[in-house]
């Protein structure tokens, strides 16, 4: 069991899995930040349109 994990193939697969999870976490964090910024921009634009009477 231990030999299979420490062999070249097993070790490479483990490293690939770790890197994949790390990339997934970074991508999710980036997507959340982008969504928050887009939401803030949308809220400001809607508030501006409401203030000048275009909507509402």
Image: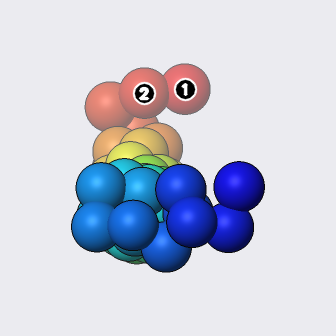
In the displayed structure, 2 sits above or below 43; it is below
Across and down, in percent, residue 11 comes to: 40, 68
Q: Is 25 or 12 nearer to us in this picture?
A: 12
Residue linked to disc 2: 55
Residue at x-position 49% and y-position 73% = 6
In the displayed structure, 55 sits above or below 24; it is above
Asked which quadrant contains residue 10, the reply is bottom left
Q: Which mark is residue 40?
A: none
- Specify the quadrant that holds the C terminus: top right
In this view of the protein, can residue 53 be seen by the observer?
yes
Asked which quadrant contains residue 5, the reply is bottom right
The answer to whether marks 1 and 2 mark residues whose Cβ atoms lie closer than 8 Å is: yes
Q: Is 13 or 4 nearer to us in this picture?
A: 4
Residue linked to disc 1: 56
Residue at x-position 71% and y-position 55% = 1
Q: Please, which residue is most extreme toward the right here?
A: 1
Residue at x-position 30% and y-position 55% = 9
Q: Secondary structure at mark 1?
A: loop
């Amino acid at each position: 069991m231990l030999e299979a994990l420490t062999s070249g193939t097993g070790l490479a697969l483990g490293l690939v899995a770790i890197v994949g999870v790390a990339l997934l976490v970074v991508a999710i964090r980036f997507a959340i930040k982008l969504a928050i910024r887009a939401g803030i921009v949308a809220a400001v634009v809607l508030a501006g349109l409401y203030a000048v009477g275009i909507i509402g």
